[in-house]
Each structure stands twice: as structure tokens, then as C-alpha cells.
Amino acid sequence: MAATDNTSNHIEQLRLQLKETLQLDLDDYGLVEQSTGEFNSTFLGVRLNSAFQPIYDIQAGDLFGHEALLRPSLGGELSSTPGFAFTYAEQAGKLVQFDRVSRTLHVLNFRQIYAENGLLFLNVHPKLLIAVNAHGKVFERILHSNSVPTERVVIEIQEGQIEQEKLLTEAIDNYRARGYRIAIDRFGSTQSHIDRLWKFAPDFVKLDQSLIQKAEQNEHIRKILPGLLKMIKDLGAQPVITGIETQEQLDIAIESGSSLVQGYFLAKPVTAHELQPAKLFKTSAVNTQVKSAA
């Protein structure tokens, strides 16, 4: 009986928090706590779940952080893509609310792995960066109410999809002023602007996954990759090689001087509940893979 009362009180606190911060009632948010302690929600008819993919520091041989990824589905059965879900929310005029709901869901689920050393990497929809003011203010209240400091949150920005540089600069400055860290995401894609690396001075630069894939097939790209990483480091940022799917790609990342890596070869995105029992195995596996590449 006491456990039931505690759960009811917890849900009621979340109801008040979401209504005050997101202007959403719990019924609209469709928030449900599972028996595993994780949360999912149904917003605009789309079921939302969180998945977390580890980012490893291969020099330290340890976990560095997690990227939170949205796993939407229709009716809880038909899997969809984050792109479709956000487009659907935008067409319904609910893009701001949908983005906040998604990130709130990630934070609620992140609490299960919060004791881990590491950062939480979160994507922000590009259109929101130029459509709202006081970036990070609303989300900061969600973080604080769940005892997650902004210093442990990295805002991932796909700058190549945003042409309005002045508005993008203001958004980055607002986030940074509140303690968030900044990552330029998918750098090296055809839409990237190299001059924005020194203009925005990000904390992290996540290389587009196509770079490591091309480096595996193209010796010329493989040779220039170390220079690209050195340039990023010289600008005061930490490069992250993403999309690692083979041992050879991990070897190339190590040879190029990369420390932070992410990809299916190292760990696939899973729920926070699934991630917990596997964390020791995954870190051990990464150490073994790094040693075999050395």
C-alpha cells in the first residue's frame, strides 16, 4: 500500500511539474512509468521511448557519456523515425512542445544511469534554435527538478541545417550562459560550415558518420583525418568519431588520434534498464578492442 501511495505521489508531482513548465497536462503528455522504472509517453498519438548509446573515451578506457535517442512508434507497435515524428509534430503546430516532451522523457530515464560518470548528449531540433527565446531556460527547470546539473548536459546542434547565423549564435550563447556544453553535430557533412568551428567555439565536434566510413574505403581521406582532428583540438574542442561499425574503423579512429568514439561496433542504443547490467561488459569489451588495435 505504501509503495502504491509513493508512486501516486510521484506521478502527481510530475503532473504539476509538466503542467507548470511545459504547459501540458499529464493526460496530454501520456506519461507512464513502467515496472522497470523507465518512462514512456504518448504525445499526439505517437508513442515515445528513450534509448541511450554510450560514448567511450578509448584513451582512458572508460565510459564518457551517453547520447539520448528518441524511439517513436505508432500505436506502440509500428516503429517510426524521429524525423517523421518531429515533422508530424511540426505540422500539428506542436513542435516546441514535442521537443520539450522528448527531452524531458530522456532526463526522466537518464536518472537510471545517472550515477555513471559521464555526460548526457541531447539533440535539439534545428528549427527550435531560431524559433524560441531564452534557450534552455524551460529545460533547465526540468533538469534541476530531477537533480541533473546543466553542466552534465551537452546540447547537440546540427549547424549545417541552420543558415541564420546570428540567431544560431544567440541560441548557443544562451545555452552556454546557463551552463550547458555545446556540440556541433554531423560535422563534415556536405552542409557543414568549417568557419563556424572558431566562431562558435564548441566543446565537442561530432564528426559525421560518413567520414569514418569513407576513411575505411579511401586512403586519401584516411590520411587527412588526423589533421582534421588536430585542427579541432587546436580550437579547444574535443572531436568525437561517430558511426564506428567495424574493427577497422576503430583502428582508424585510434590511428587518427581520436579519444572519444561512438558506434554500433562498440554499443548499440538500448534502454536505460538494458544498459545497466551490460555496462561492465561493454566497457571491458571496448578495452579489449582497443588493445587489439594497439
Image (spheres, rainbow, N blue to C red):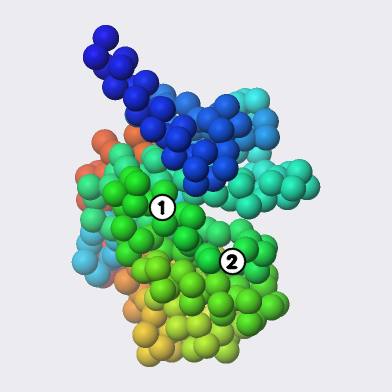
Which residue appears at 52% of the width and 88% of the height? Answer: 199
Which residue appears at 45% of the width and 50% of the height? Answer: 68
Q: Position of residue 76 (x, y in %)?
A: 60, 26
The answer to which quarter of the image holds residue 55 is bottom left
The answer to whether residue 213 shows anywhere in this view is no
**Residue type, label 2:** Asn
The answer to which quarter of the image holds residue 274 is top left
Could you say which is closer to the camera, residue 216 or residue 142? 142
Could you say which is closer to the camera, residue 226 or residue 49? 49
Alpha-carbon neighbours of circle 2 within 10 Å: few (<14), some, or many (≥20)? few
Which residue appears at 34% of the width and 34% of the height? Answer: 273
The answer to which quarter of the image holds residue 35 is top left
Which residue appears at 57% of the width and 38% of the height? Answer: 24
For numbered disc 1, what is the local secondary structure? helix
Q: Which residue is mark 1?
A: 141
The label on residue 38 is: none
Placement of 20 over or under 138, stated as above or below: above
Q: Position of residue 114 (x, y in %)?
A: 28, 47
Q: Residue furthest right?
A: 91
Q: Position of residue 78 (x, y in %)?
A: 66, 29
Placement of 226 over or under 270, stated as above or below: below
For numbered disc 2, what is the local secondary structure? loop
Q: Which residue is mark 2?
A: 133
Could you say which is closer to the camera, residue 216 or residue 104? 104
Q: Can you say which quadrant of the picture contains the N terminus?
A: top left
The answer to whether residue 135 shows anywhere in this view is yes
63 relative position to 107: left or right:
left
Placement of 93 over or under 240, stated as above or below: above
